Amino acid sequence: MSVSNTARSYGTVTKTFHWLTALLILMIAPLGMIAHDLPYGTDAELAQKAFLFSLHKTLGVTVFFVALARILWALGQVKPGALTAPHSAQAMIASLVHWLLYISIVAVPLTGWVHHAATSGFAPIWWPFGQDLPLVPKSQSLAEVTAVLHGLFSQIMIASIALHVAGAFKHHLIDKDATLRRMWFGKTNAAGLGGAHGSWRAPVAALAIFALTGGIGAAVALVQSYDTAAPAQIALEQVSAGWTVTDGQISIGITQLGSNVQGSFTDWTAAINFDPAATGIAGEVSTTISIPSLTLGSVTSQAMGADFFDSATYPTARFTGAIIAEAGSYTADGVLAIKGSEVPVRFPFDLTVAGDTAEMSGTLTLDRRDFGIGASMADESSLGFAVDVTLSVSATR
């Protein structure tokens, strides 16, 4: 049996690529569906869900590279002619299905991979590469768009596979020709009638289908993102104090299933009264944070749930305390209220004052258990206890 294709038969390499791709897809598709529907309310449930998603993603990256290798190999190979009449409707449909499959085995894993790279956290890829991709920023909107495209392109792939399999069995059982046999291993020679494979209409139609689906999917994802995010936001009251915050960020970092996940709150206020010349108690600060404004990678929606921040019941967090200046060091000493729990907190920070402008930054490590967050996850195998909080603020007097 020839390694390369001939005008009458497929070679060993082409057949190996065909069946390897089919095997991987038959494994990946059920894994994704099962993992998507699994609950994640407990440590064991989350670990199982993450394991299946990691397996799904890892095999998906494998399919991507197998597909690229298959396409590169096919570019240099003769393609045996179709066994149906050239330019017949059946030949054109078969060619269209083949092109849909070629595009989907690249587009489906690629959109899934970009989705993974655009967010952070849940279910890492097991290859020693691929957690991030060049030119792919961490972006919630990009992650949402690629998630929708991944789902839509997967449906095109599944439909194309169903048509491909149906066509193969039609050839084998009804037409009784060698279409199916010549893709299996062994020597099979069957003169093709030719013609259909060279038509430009099938690839153009396949590309048009993906382009149209992608455009509609991206638009729907952006609309859904806007509609979903809008009701969750709350309006914080404006504050007035001796210092006005001009810029700043409140970020948090957690560890989930061994992976670091970074997030930030986009909506918060701070009322600051502070005398840079004073020592001891030099001022006071009151900060209110909108919990629904948090973005936390792929686990944002999970973080809003009742077992975590429970943002529907407790939409804000608040820190109120005194600013203490001692020998050039600064500490905010007060109480942090999250999810109905009030915990004493000492927050050391660095401060630089130049005239009427102040720059401060600091990092604090909290224990999520003190606030009843993630109570169902009693150990750190799924979710670490430590939550790193980083604050940076620019303010003017």
Image (tube, helix red, strand yellow):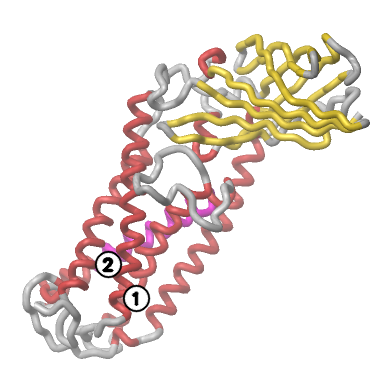
Q: Quadrant of the N terminus?
A: bottom left
Q: Is residue 188 visible?
A: yes
Image location (x, y in percent) of residue 147: 48, 50
- Secondary structure beneath dot 1 equals helix
* Residue 87, image quadrant: bottom left
* Residue 86, image quadrant: bottom left
Q: Amino acid at mark 1?
A: Leu
**301 sits to left or right of 38:** right
Q: Residue at x 50, y 68 (%)?
A: 211
Which residue ends up furthest to the left in the rendered image?
187
For residue 149: magenta? yes
Q: Quadrant of the C terminus?
A: top right
Q: Residues within 10 Å of mark 1 (few under 14, many from 20)?
A: many
Q: Nearer the viewer, residue 74 or 301?
A: 74
Image location (x, y in percent) of residue 242: 91, 23
- Earlier sequence position, callout 2 versus callout 1: 1
Q: How many marks?
A: 2
Contact (Cβ within 8 Å) of mark 2 with mark 1: no
Q: Residue at x 32, y 40 (%)?
A: 52
- Secondary structure beneath dot 2 equals helix
Residue bearing mark 2: 163
For residue 386: magenta? no
Image location (x, y in percent) of residue 145: 53, 53
Q: Amino acid at mark 2?
A: Leu
Q: Residue at x 48, y 64 (%)?
A: 213
Q: Nearer the viewer, residue 15 or 36?
A: 15
Residue bearing mark 1: 96
Residue stretch rendered in magenta on the structure: 144-164
Check residue 199 in the rendering and tell me which mark sits there, or answer none. none
Q: Is residue 322 above or below residue 11?
A: above
Q: Residues within 10 Å of mark 2 (few under 14, many from 20)?
A: some
Q: Nearer the viewer, residue 112 or 273?
A: 273
